[in-house]
Image (cartoon, coloured by chain):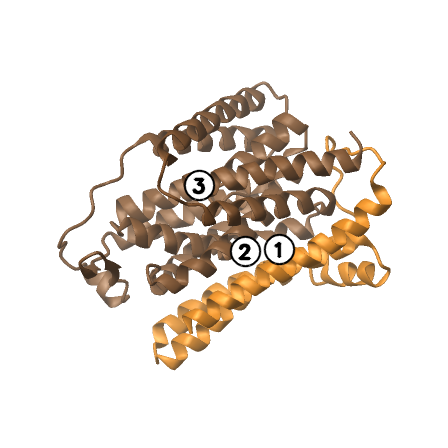
Chain colours: A brown, B orange
Amino acid sequence: MNVMEFTAVVATVSFVAGLLGSLTGLGGGVVLVPLLTLLFHVDIRYAIGASLVSVIATSSGAAAAYVKEGFSNIRIGMFLEIATTFGALMGAFLATRIPTSALAIIFGAMLLYSAFLSRKPRPPAQRNLPPDPLATRLRLNGSFPDLEGPRSYNVQHVPTGFSLMFGAGALSGLLGIGSGAVKVLAMDQAMRIPFKVSTTTSNFMIGVTAAASAGVYLSRGYVDPGLAMPVMLGVLAGSLIGSRILVKAETKSLRLVFSLVILVLGLQMLYKGFWGKI
Amino acid sequence: MEVILGNLLRSGVLLSAAVVLWGGCIYLSRHAHEPANYRVFQGEPSEFRSIPGVIRSVMNGRGRGLIQLGLLLLIATPIARVSFSIVGFAIERDRMYVVFTLIVLAILLYSLLGSGIGV
């Protein structure tokens, strides 16, 4: 393939990944790295560099729309960003030291977990949980607009959530993804933050987290302009259009298809990683 | 404040996308028919790995230099957002969160400058 054909095909695939990622809420970054490595035989380090850049673009683009609606909690975001940015920095340094086959295996495991998580029902919404003293001290509790007026919530298990977010940041730095799956575990399940608040807040955190590892990737020469250009523009265009046509209709079957794709990609990454074909 | 931050993020992303697109057009107009090969990892040449290197390559009119400049702008967008949050928390006289935000900013700047991108 020459540069023109390669750019056109990668941009198209990135556009579809961004579109589906935003329509299903599962994020496009998670399928990009496996698609680039498995389909286009791009070295996994270049793929991670390009994906990381596209993650910043979609997160910042989407967060711009979200902050206006009053769902995202800036204090929760900033507090947890201490953990995610520190984790991302560690992850990025680690990524330059471990073999690519190990990266592929970790990536595969992450994909399988994401596929599993996307089929699991959401934890029930919290109702009148008692305020946690640490969360109160950190002023993490808040309220968000609901159908029957503002609804308040009390954040739980702050230390567990904080540690999990460190892990989410490390995975993001290691694999060049938004690692939304681990964030769900930390914010929804451990801290019991309401779904709308946790998704919008985590979306705005993803860009900051990714920016913490992007510097390391760029200086190590993992970000190739010829590859990052179609990936970033494609994913950004796809996710912007996806968020415009986000009508509730038929995302259910779309989610099923997308999580099957994630499952297959995860198995392939594991196979390639274990048999040293990457 | 929130609205300003939202607009800041949006314009940062759009500006960087425009620069990347512009650089991409120059790059494609010159290299369209060369073979594309990302199978073997070589690492980028130093002109695409550091801020001064990127600026030099933009000055030389290189398309890929412009793409990297756009990507640097993209990385700078969330950093600018965090910096503005410090002002926001300071206006609310929330000392604790000013400190938290400064910690995040320090980690971000360390990643950008400490990793050797600035030289």
Same subunit, tags 1 and 2: yes
Q: Quadrant of the N terminus of chain B?
A: bottom left
Q: Find residue B77 and report its image quarter.
A: bottom right
Q: Are marks 3 and 1 in contact (CB under 8 Å)?
A: no
The residue type indicated by label 3 comes to Leu
Find numbered disc 1 in the image and state the secondary structure of the residue it sits on. Answer: helix
Q: Is residue A163 above or below residue A117?
A: below
Find numbered disc 3 in the image and state the secondary structure of the residue it sits on. Answer: helix
In front: label 3 or label 1:
3
- The alpha-carbon separation of the residues under discs 1 and 2 comes to 6 Å
x, y percent for residue A45: 64, 38
Q: Quadrant of the C terminus of chain B?
A: bottom right
Sequence-earlier tag: 2 or 3: 3
**Residue that appears at 80% across and 60% down:** B58
- Chain bearing tag 2 is A
Same subunit, tags 2 and 3: yes
Which of the labelled discs sits on residue A215, or is there none?
1
Q: Nearer the viewer, residue A216 or B22?
A: B22
- Chain bearing tag 1 is A
Residue holding disc 3: A23
Q: Nearer the viewer, residue A225 or B53?
A: A225
Residue holding disc 2: A212
